[in-house]
Image: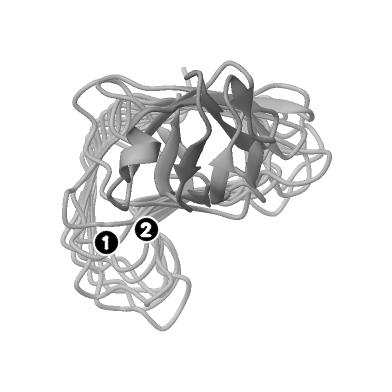
Amino acid sequence: MPPTPFGLTFAGGGGGIIVGFGGTSTVGSEYIVQGNTISNLNSGSGIQIGDGRNIVISGNILRNWGTGDGININSSLATGIQNLTITGNILDTNTNSAGSGNGIVCSPGVGGVKNVTIGSNQISSIAFHGIKINACLDGTITGNQIFNFNLQAASANGIDLESGATAWTIGNNRARSTAANGFAIGINTGAVDNIVSGNIDLNAAGAFYDNGTRTIIFGEKVNASDKNFQLNSPGAGIGLNGSTSGVVTHVAGSVITSYTETDPLAVPIVAGAVKTYTTGAVASFSAAPGSLTIASGTSTLTSNAALAAVTSQAAITTTATNALTTDAIEWSFATAPTAGDNLCHVLSYVTAGNVNFVRTNPTAAAQNVSALIINWRVVR
């Protein structure tokens, strides 16, 4: 039967439940840590796991657990930690914030940590990140409530997926009143995508922030007051989803009031839009509802006191950054046409990166045409 700390109460002292550290535990040991109450520790973490496989940590209550983390997973043996479930725990109000002070932390340590499920935990009012995942492999973070981090450091996130964490699914979590970002996704250096789906960020000042590669993000909802949904990764040779390309989809009903990125094209996105990157550039957009404005500006036609009969002027070409030949132009005159202008017609068309306007006199007599100004925008 696996070691089973169950129904114990820890108060005071220098640490709570410590299992598998110091290299003395049997390789592959199994543990169940369930139904314990841990509070008012002087130092250390509430629950620490250092090795083993098939580990369950559930139904524990941790409050003021010490200067360390509430639940700390850190491999101390070369065999590592595998098949770990952390579910249904309550981590509430840790005022002992001199140390790292995270809620739940997974770190690879000596032998690595993989196959982890973190679900349905309540984490509130702690010193730093709610859930922090370092360079660990294969995990799921789902259904956690992370809120009211009034004690947090300014840089703390609700869920913090650090660089090197690979093959994680983060879904259906809720973050509210975290000090920095509700969700922060780091650079994925592995070969398998991280998937972020269906989370809700209800921060007044925070954001959903992605700074990584090999990440698929869809169905996220951010608070309307955020004004900050950031994707900070695309650049030369990398993308949001894999080493050369990426897709971000905001389903209809998503609330996005602004969109900031370091992508060189930096075209605004609207709620319900799909944005596709290829090698640091935007390949295509589609939007629901409505359309995207890719570029806008003005063009000025050339005046001519006697534009000959049945004659066209040379095309007026104006730069329209990111415009494609599959886009459309919406335009109108910014100045009133003259009598001669009224007898002529103007055609518009898009070339790659440009808009073009051609004025033609179809009549049998020369016409006096003015330097009409055209307001235009390219839509997709």
The colour scheme applied to this rendered structure is one colour
Q: Which residue extends farthest bottom?
A: 98
Q: Secondary structure at mark 2?
A: loop
Residue 357: name its quadrant.
top right
**Whether residue 29 can be seen here:** no
Residue positioned 31% across, 53% down in the render: 335
The x, y position of residue 314, in whole percent, is 69, 36
| Disc 1 to disc 2: CB gap under 8 Å | yes
Check the image and report above or below for 273 versus 355. above
Which amino acid does the dot numbered 2 rest on?
Asn
The x, y position of residue 337, in whole percent, is 32, 44
Residue positioned 78% across, 30% down in the render: 243
Q: Residues within 10 Å of mark 1 (few under 14, many from 20)?
A: many
Q: Is residue 380 left or right of residue 288?
A: right
Q: Is residue 37 left or right of residue 301?
A: left
Residue 181 shows which numbered tag? 2
| Residue 186 or residue 133, whichever sits in front | 186
Residue positioned 57% across, 48% down in the render: 304
The x, y position of residue 143, in whole percent, is 26, 29
Which amino acid does the dot numbered 1 rest on?
Thr
Q: Secondary structure at mark 1?
A: loop
The x, y position of residue 370, in whole percent, is 45, 50
Q: Which residue extends farthest front?
A: 365
Q: Is residue 99 left or right of residue 62?
A: right
| Residue 244 or residue 271, whichever sits in front | 271
Residue 111: name its quadrant.
top right
Viewport quadrant of the C terminus: top left
Residue 178 shows which numbered tag? 1
**Whether residue 279 can be seen here:** yes
